[in-house]
Image (cartoon, grey):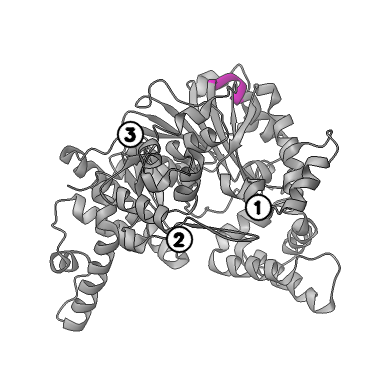
Amino acid sequence: MTDAKSRYGAADVRYVAAFQPESAPARLRLALAMADTWWNPPDPERMTVLDIGCGRGLSACLLAAANPGWDVIGLDLQPVHIEEAREVARQGGIDNARFIEADLAELTEVNSPDLLPELDVVICHGVWSWVPDPVRDGIVRMLKSRLKPGGVILLGYNALPGYADTLHFQRLVDEAARSLPGDDAQRGLAAIEAIVALREQAPLYLPEPRVLEHIVNAARNAPAYMVHEWLTSFWRPAYHADVARALVPARLEYGGTARPAGSMPELQLNPEQRAALAAAPAGIARETLLDTFLARRFRTDIFIRGRRPGGRALLGPTMLALTAPADRTKIEIVTPSGTLELKPPQRDALLEALSDGPKTIAELADLPACATLNHIDIALMLVESQAAEPLWRAPRHDPADNARLARCCDSLLRHFAPEASAMRAPIGVPIAAMGSALPVGASELALCGALLSGLPPDPVVLSRHLARPQGDEDARARAETGIAQVLEGLLPTWRAMGILP
């Protein structure tokens, strides 16, 4: 076992690139506002962001590209990740992103300032559940030393009791993989398939078939993800209450969840369940009770250093923009009790208003057809249905930024497109108005990069540049048709958000 593996079980395996939309600053602000937690950084154009366990740097590079005035830092244990992340940033011209190889277990309140500046935002997605206590303790010490008062951390982790059905399964997979031949990915997949085969004998303590099928398919499609997810002795889902307690020394308080709709009793529980929740003994933590009823296997919690109420006052000024043309947009949220939809006049009024460009939630609430909707209703229905995205700043088309963003897109494509296409996973196009990125596939990112480089939104021109079919008229025609369909769906959004004129 290498020293790195004593900190992280999959330290020898290059991780898959994954963009986390929840890390968008506008989403964090909106989610906290919906929980009535105040978070409104005094200078949104000058912030310092740390991505713990940054992997190969995709999310950090997207945040840095969308916010050239920010200082974005990626931190990871694996040197191969840091090397590639630096290369992505260098080739993409992203000079405000830097990447540091570090062992979090070695961080103290004394030496953290030597490594990191004071931080406004910390992203810690997919780390907490997979590392031993010394690393968790190092994270807390670093947060106590470096996170500013009023700063926030987005913490994504496997949650209990939702993940309880896989506790025994993971133990079996981890132990079986140690005795099997091959590399980590081969051993892991063979171990998973061997354990899944046991279900034919009706064992009592394996996940239900639907969950097992998902695990197997994910392992086959993304072997590196499978290794990082399952092959570590430190794998430990956590109760929210235990995570919150661990963060107390850093003076952090729970501010809200980055996925509000999935956590609202009004949406997710029936009246009898809500009554049972209210009647439960007061000594049980509220989030523990909620997780008893909710299908919440992975939590995306936002903690803040010094929680202040009053965040709902920030909902009205929040600007929203459609993510697709109105005629392709559905405003609905699926819940255990059915699909939640707006009344047709409300839906049509919101879509018509947003089709003219981004609007604040207060402006949308003032629409006559929406008189019965409050600010939370509008934010919830539009953002949680993925019909709209909250903006960090007003859209502004700046041709001087186009070459920089085009170079960023080119670097992301060079490093991440093949595996993203194979896994059918989104990458992301950086959008200054969002302060983050809009998840798109590799082909859409290539198209946006071509437009940013100055090519016209003409399917013929773009097909020659991107597809380059040589002498094959059928292939050229198919490429032109596909590009035209993508432009029809995304061009209005890109223009509304200021990417293109």
Question: Is most of the magenta stretch helix, strand or loop?
Answer: helix
Q: Is residue 106 visible?
A: yes
User: Quadrant location of residue 367?
Assistant: top left
C-alpha distance separating marks 2 and 3: 27 Å
Residue 114 rendering spot, x and y as whole percentages: 51, 19
Q: Residue at x 51, y 24 (%)?
A: 115
Q: SS at mark 1?
A: helix
User: Quadrant location of residue 185?
Assistant: bottom right
- Magenta segment, which residues? 142-149
Pointer 2 or 1: first along the chain:
1
What label does residue 393 carry, if any? 3
Query: Mark 2 = which residue?
Result: 425
Query: Mark 1 = which residue?
Result: 268
Q: Mark 2: few, some, or many residues within 10 Å (few <14, many ≥20)? A: some
Q: Which residue occupies the foreground of this view, 180 or 303?
A: 303
Task: Please tell me whether residue 251 is drawn above or below residue 465 in the rendered image.
Answer: above
Q: Mark 3: few, some, or many residues within 10 Å (few <14, many ≥20)? A: some
